[in-house]
C-alpha cells in the first residue's frame, strides 16, 4: 500500500501544471540543503576542539548538554514556520477499500522522512565519533546519540500536534510563540530551570543507558496522539459544518466614482477584509510603513543615501508587493466562474492596478513624517512612490500572468507559503533590486538629486505609457487564461 501511495504522489508531481516551476524550486532548495548540511557538519567537527579550547577545565559533552534546551526550543520554532507537513489528497481514497489506519500511518511515517529530522545528524554523528575517538565509553555515547535522535522525532510529532490545533486560527503562530516564549522566560528568570532539567536528563541517559526508554515512550505517546487526531478528521464529511459568522457589510458606494471598474474593486475590497490570508496584506501595511524606523534613527544609515530608495520603494509599495504578487491567484477559487462572465479582462486588471496605485499614494502621504530625519529621505520616498506607480505596478501585473498556483483564502495567514512559486522569487529583482541599483548608480556617478530624478522619470514614463502597457499585459493574460484555469483547478 505504501508503494501505491508513493506512486500516486509521484504521478501528481509529474502531471502537475506547476511541474517545471516545482522542479526549479526543488533544485534551488537543494542548494540550500547542501549549505545547511555543510554548516552542521562543520559544527559537528569543530565542536569538541573548540569547546576544549575555550573551556579547557570542563567536559565538552556536559557543556553541550547544558545548551540542549535552547536547541529544542529553536528546533521547534524553526519547524513550525518552515517545515511543510506531509499532505495527501485523501478524500478520493476514502471512497476506495483503503483502511484509514494505513492512510494515517503513511502520512505520519512520511513526516519522519523530513529533512529537518536528518539535519541535526550531521552535527550529532561527527561529535559522537569525536567523543568515541577521545576514549569516551562507546556504548554510552551511542545511547546519548540515540536519545538526541528520539528527541528530534518527538519535536517532529509535537510540531504536528501544534500545527493541527492552530491551522484554522487566524493568528496561528500564537500557540508556538506562547509555548516557546513562556518556557524561555521561565528559564531565563530562573523560575523553572529547564536548562538544568534537560541537561540532567541527558547526563543521566549517558550514565544509565536503560533510561533511553523514557524518550522512546514519549515518542510513542506523541505518535499515538497524532494518529488519533488525524484518524478523527479522516472523514468525507469532516469540515462540512463550519462556524457561522456574521459578515460586517461596509459601505463601498465611494468606489462607484471609478466607473466600470467599481464592481471589481468592491470584490477586491471585500476579499481583502473577509479572508484570513488576504487580511495579512492589510496588516502588513503597518509593518511596511514603520520599516524605515529600523534604519533612519541610526546614524550609520544617514551616511548611506543610496539606500533610501530601497526603503522608499518598500515603504510606499508594501501593499503593492504583498498583494500584487499573487494576482490573479487571490481569485483562484472562483477564477473559472469569473472568466465565464461577459466581462472585459482589461477592466479586471485595471481594478487591481487602481487599488495598488491608491495604496502607493496613501502610503507616501502617511510616510511624510519621515522628513523629521532629513529632507533627502522625503525626496527619495517621493521618487520611489512615483517609480512604484509607473513601473512596479505594471511589472507586478505582468508577473501575475505567470502565476499557476492556487490559494486557499481560508488557510492561516502567518507564514503561509501557499501560492508561492518561482514567479514570487524572481519578481523581487525588478521590484526592489533594480530601482536600488539605478538609484545607486546615478548617486555615485552624479549625485543624490539626479538619482531621485532618474527614478521619478522612469515612473513618469510608465504613467505616460500606461494605456499601451495595460494592453500588452492584458494580451499576455488572455494568452495564459486557459492555462491558469487548468492550474487553479488542481490542488497541488
Image (spheres, grey):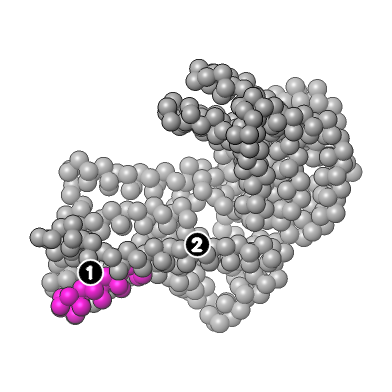
Name the foreground residue: 238 vs 146. 146
Does 366 sit left or right of 135 as displayed? right
* Residue drawn 26% across the image and 42% down it: 185
Q: Dot 2 lies on which element?
A: helix
Give the mark nearer the N terminus: 2 vs 1: 2
* Residue drawn 83% across the image and 34% down it: 466
Q: Which residue is mark 1?
A: 214
Q: For the view shown, which residue lies furthest in the left direction?
A: 57
Q: Is residue 446 above or below residue 373?
A: below
Name the foreground residue: 42 vs 132. 42
Query: Closer to the camera: disc 2 or disc 1?
Result: 2
Q: Dot 1 lies on which element?
A: helix
Q: Looking at the picture, how far across and down is residue 102, in whole percent?
A: 50, 76
Q: For the view shown, which residue lies furthest in the front direction?
A: 445
Magenta residues, as a range? 121-138
Q: Looking at the picture, how far across and down is residue 177, in whole percent?
A: 38, 45
Residue 455 visible to the viewer: yes
Whether 123 is among the magenta residues is: yes
Residue 247 visible to the viewer: no
Q: Quadrant of residue 379?
A: top right
Cα–Cα span, label 2 and label 1: 34 Å
Does 67 sit left or right of 73 as displayed? left
Q: Which residue is mark 2?
A: 32
Whether 317 is among the magenta residues is: no
| Crowd band around label 1 with a 10 angstrom C-alpha radius: few (<14), some (14–19), many (20+) | some
Q: Looking at the picture, how far across and down is residue 426, in whole percent?
A: 65, 52
Image quarter (top left, top right, bottom left or bottom right) of the N terminus: bottom right
* Residue drawn 62% across the image and 43% down it: 433
Q: Main secondary structure of the magenta part?
A: helix
* Residue drawn 89% across the image and 43% down it: 342
Amino acid at each position: 500500500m505504501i508503494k501505491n501511495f508513493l506512486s500516486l504522489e509521484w504521478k501528481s508531481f509529474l502531471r502537475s501544471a506547476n511541474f517545471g516551476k516545482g522542479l526549479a524550486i526543488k533544485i534551488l532548495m537543494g542548494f540550500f540543503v547542501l549549505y545547511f548540511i555543510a554548516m552542521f557538519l562543520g559544527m559537528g567537527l569543530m565542536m569538541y576542539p573548540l569547546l576544549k579550547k575555550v573551556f579547557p577545565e570542563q567536559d565538552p559533552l556536559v557543556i553541550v548538554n547544558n545548551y540542549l534546551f535552547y536547541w529544542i526550543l529553536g528546533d521547534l520554532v524553526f519547524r513550525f514556520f518552515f517545515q511543510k507537513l506531509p499532505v495527501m489528497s485523501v478524500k478520493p481514497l476514502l471512497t476506495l477499500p483503503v483502511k484509514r489506519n494505513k492512510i494515517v500511518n503513511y502520512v505520519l511515517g512520511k513526516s519522519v522522512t523530513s529533512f529537518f529530522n536528518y539535519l541535526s545528524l550531521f552535527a550529532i554523528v561527527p561529535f559522537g565519533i569525536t567523543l568515541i575517538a577521545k576514549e569516551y565509553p562507546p556504548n554510552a555515547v551511542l545511547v546519548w546519540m540515540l536519545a538526541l535522535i528520539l528527541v528530534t522525532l518527538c519535536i517532529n510529532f509535537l510540531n504536528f500536534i501544534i500545527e493541527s490545533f492552530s491551522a484554522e486560527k487566524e493568528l496561528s503562530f500564537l500557540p508556538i510563540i506562547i509555548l516557546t516564549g513562556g518556557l524561555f522566560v521561565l528559564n531565563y528568570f530562573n523560575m523553572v530551570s529547564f536548562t538544568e532539567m534537560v541537561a540532567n536528563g541527558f547526563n543521566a541517559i549517558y550514565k544509565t543507558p536503560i533510561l533511553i526508554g523514557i524518550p522512546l515512550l514519549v515518542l510513542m505517546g506523541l505518535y499515538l496522539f497524532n494518529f488519533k487526531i488525524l484518524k478523527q478528521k479522516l472523514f468525507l464529511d469532516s469540515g462540512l459544518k463550519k462556524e457561522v459568522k456574521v459578515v460586517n457589510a461596509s459601505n463601498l458606494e465611494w468606489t462607484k466614482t471609478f466607473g466600470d471598474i467599481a464592481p471589481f474593486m468592491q470584490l477586491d475590497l471585500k476579499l481583502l477584509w473577509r479572508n484570513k490570508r488576504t487580511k495579512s496584506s492589510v496588516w502588513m501595511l503597518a509593518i511596511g510603513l514603520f520599516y524605515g524606523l529600523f534604519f533612519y534613527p541610526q546614524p550609520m544609515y544617514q551616511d548611506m543615501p543610496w539606500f533610501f530608495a530601497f526603503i522608499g520603494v518598500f515603504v510606499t509599495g508594501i501593499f503593492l508587493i504583498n498583494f500584487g504578487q499573487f494576482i490573479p491567484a487571490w481569485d483562484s477559487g472562483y477564477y473559472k466562474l469569473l472568466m465565464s462572465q461577459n466581462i472585459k479582462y482589461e477592466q479586471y486588471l485595471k481594478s487591481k492596478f487602481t487599488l495598488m496605485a491608491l495604496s502607493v499614494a496613501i502610503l507616501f502621504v502617511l510616510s511624510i513624517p519621515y522628513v523629521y530625519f532629513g529632507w533627502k529621505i522625503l525626496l527619495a520616498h517621493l521618487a520611489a512612490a512615483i517609480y512604484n506607480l509607473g513601473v512596479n505596478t505594471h511589472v507586478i501585473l505582468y508577473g501575475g500572468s505567470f502565476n499557476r498556483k492556487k490559494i486557499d483564502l481560508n488557510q492561516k495567514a502567518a507564514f503561509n507559503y501557499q501560492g508561492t512559486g518561482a514567479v514570487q522569487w524572481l519578481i523581487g529583482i525588478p521590484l526592489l533590486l533594480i530601482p536600488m541599483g539605478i538609484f545607486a548608480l546615478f548617486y555615485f556617478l552624479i549625485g543624490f538629486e539626479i538619482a531621485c530624478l532618474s527614478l521619478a522619470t522612469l515612473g513618469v514614463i510608465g504613467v505616460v505609457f500606461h494605456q499601451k502597457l495595460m494592453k500588452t499585459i492584458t494580451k499576455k493574460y488572455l494568452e495564459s487564461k486557459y492555462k491558469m484555469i487548468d492550474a487553479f483547478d488542481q490542488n497541488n
